[in-house]
Image: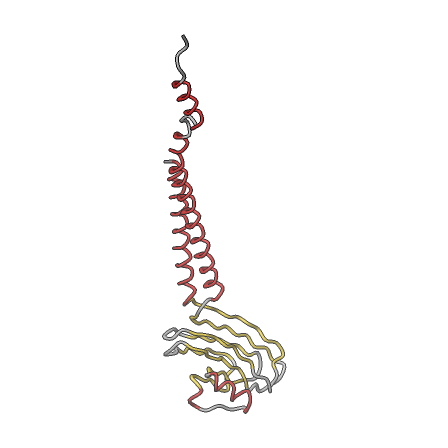
Amino acid sequence: MKSISQWLAVVIIGLVVVLAGIIILYSGLEAKLELRDSLDDVATESIYYFEMEASGGKAIEVQYNLSAGNMTVAILTETGFVNLSNNGSFAAEEMYDKAMNTSIGDINWTPEASGTYYIVFYGFSVDESSLEIEVSYFGMDTPRFLGGLIVIIIGILIAILGMILRRKRSISEIKKPEEDIGSEPAPEDQAEELSELKEPPEV
């Protein structure tokens, strides 16, 4: 009974660990992510950007503070970002939101569908200013997702260990009666006893 309790306890622990891993993994699929960055000595001809995989229906919030001059802030598609980088411009359909001639403010925009989006800072009016950025959005938290996956694997291995312990217990129970059968006399001993019975009695 003690051994049965041991393997069953191991299996239950494994299942609990698997459940915890599923919760962690699921929470990593759509988590609130934040980015804080500070850029010094920004140049007028430079383009600064942040690429993100954001969830649809969840707000993207961008807060910024430029110490001197002004700039343009935009949320672009991948194609719009490539065109801006290569050609210095993009089409209207490649832009989701935009703030021009700004230095301090925020952008709050909610994408309709999950996808890749670019927050771009460009068109600085003066050199050597500093830029502080805070971005929050919902998307996959890769470290949390992978952590949950690892926890699930560990839980499965623990449960398998419990089943192995149960199998060992079953095997030992099958072999136990064989030990009792082994107490019977060996065949050669039985033959010797029979030969003794066959010998004629002494006169």
**14 vs 125, nearest the viewer:** 14
Give the position of the N terminus as an image quadrant: top left
Q: Residue at x 43, y 83 (%)?
A: 97
Above/below status of 84 relative to 35: below
| Residue 145 drawn at (x, y percent) | 45, 63
Front residue of 31/10: it is: 10
Residue sitting nearer the eye, 30 or 69: 30
Would you identify the image quadrant in which residue 30 lies?
A: bottom left
Q: Does 182 sit left or right of 37 as displayed?
A: left
From this view, report whether residue 186 is shown above or below residue 129.
above
- State which quadrant residue 46 falls in: bottom right
The residue at the point 44 percent across, 50 percent down is 158
Q: What is the x, y in percent for residue 28?
A: 43, 64
In percent of width and height, residue 118 lies at 48, 80
Q: Where is the C terminus found, in terms of image quarters?
A: top left
Total tally of numbered discs in the picture: 0
Image coordinates of residue 68 in percent, x first then y, are 58, 81
Q: In the orientation shown, which residue stands out farthest toward the front?
A: 203
Decide: is 174 above or below 115. Answer: above
Q: Nearer the viewer, residue 15 or 199?
A: 199
Residue at 43% x, 90% y is 92
Task: Tell me which colouring the rendered structure shows.
Answer: secondary structure
